[in-house]
Amino acid sequence: MEFNEMKSTWNAVRTPTIPSTEIQAMLSENKHPVLKGIRKQLTIEIIGWCIFLSCYYTMFDANLKPLWINILLVLSILLPLIHNLMGYRLAKYLVHGANIRESLKNYLSKIKIYAIISIVSRQIYLAGFLLFFTYGLRFNTSRYVLLAVIGLIFLVQLWLLSRLWAKRLKNLGNTIAIFR
Amino acid sequence: MDETQFLTCIEEYQGIIHKICRLYRDTREDREDLFQEITFQLWKSLPAFKNEAKISTWIYRIALNTAIATFRKKKHAIEYRPVLPDLPEEQPSEELALRQERLFAALKQLDDADKAIITLYFEELSYQQIAAITGISENYVGVKLNRIKIKIQKLLIQ
């Protein structure tokens, strides 16, 4: 296929027509597919954690544990929620510059920070819970084995999450490199 | 520009957005999501739009930026059908449809950045306009286009 033929083929592409009423609905944050998903997740998480925080103190003998363990548990719950809120803002505004290269570069910097927080908050969340529920426990062989298994699951999760972010960041980085 | 003017503008230029969606996404569902995402980002970026730029140039920039920046969902296999499901009722001739399918199959194999540059070239934008939208120099646009043309030719022969 000659290049002019490619151009004419491209220009001959017929596209569907979406009426303005449908386009108008797309302007609403409530109809946005990604933002809707994040909002739903946030609402469920906030309700769930509010219920947990309102009853954990008496249900899990939190009064018998040191204050710092309690603070760590609350923080480990709050951090993923803050992370989700950050994700919401990041997904809401994708354009950060006067041209594509500049915008993607700025977006990459933001995504890098978000990725680090994503991994760290997940680990703090898991560690906070583990510390809270194992504090003061007497360890025997079977409990040590269980702890090792949980630790291994944490590490696998950390590895999977890091790999996912590394792949995303690499793809975006490669695209920016081509624009150089 | 108020909401009514914005909607008229999107209605007029939606063909551009549809083509970008077709190039950057493989399934109908993903294309619909990307169309919505681009429309939403255009709306959010509207306050920053300066009237000295052409509206179409601005739409290209935001649409391509959004297509590249959004992470794709789980990869789907590309469906090769003689009649694409999201095309309008009036279909192109069989020969033209086949040519379009071949072209898109080749273009889809390019990097996201190359896809953006070739899209702008196909849409008859000047090197100067392509440079302004992408943020690369005019000279480099020429170099890149030559490389992309060779890549596409190779992909079409395969």
Image (spheres, helix red, strand yellow):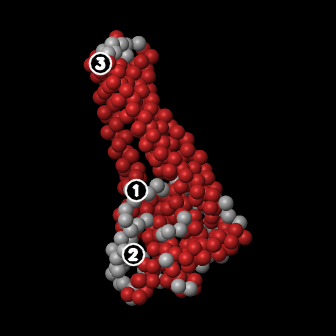
**Outermost residue toward the left in this view:** A59
Along the line of sight, the residue nearer the viewer: A160 or B25: A160
Q: 10 Å neighbourhood of mark 2: few (<14), some, or many (≥20)?
A: some
Q: Is residue A95 visible?
A: yes
Along the line of sight, the residue nearer the viewer: A52 or B95: B95
Q: Is residue B16 visible?
A: no
Q: Position of residue A169 (x, y in %)?
A: 54, 50
Above or below — where is A44 with respect to B99?
A: above
CA gap, disc 2 to disc 3?
58 Å
| First in sequence: mark 2 vs mark 3 | 2
Q: Identify the element where label 1 is drawn.
A: loop
Q: Position of residue B63 (x, y in %)?
A: 52, 64
Above or below — where is A79 with respect to A33?
A: above
Q: Which residue is mark 1?
A: B73
Q: Amino acid at mark 3?
A: Phe
Q: What is the chain letter for disc 3?
A: A
Residue shown at the point (55%, 72%) measured from the top left: B119
Q: Amino acid at mark 1?
A: Lys
Q: What is the chain letter for disc 1?
A: B
Residue A16, numbered label: 2
Q: Which residue is mark 3?
A: A60
CA gap, disc 1 to disc 3?
39 Å
Q: 10 Å neighbourhood of mark 3: few (<14), some, or many (≥20)?
A: few
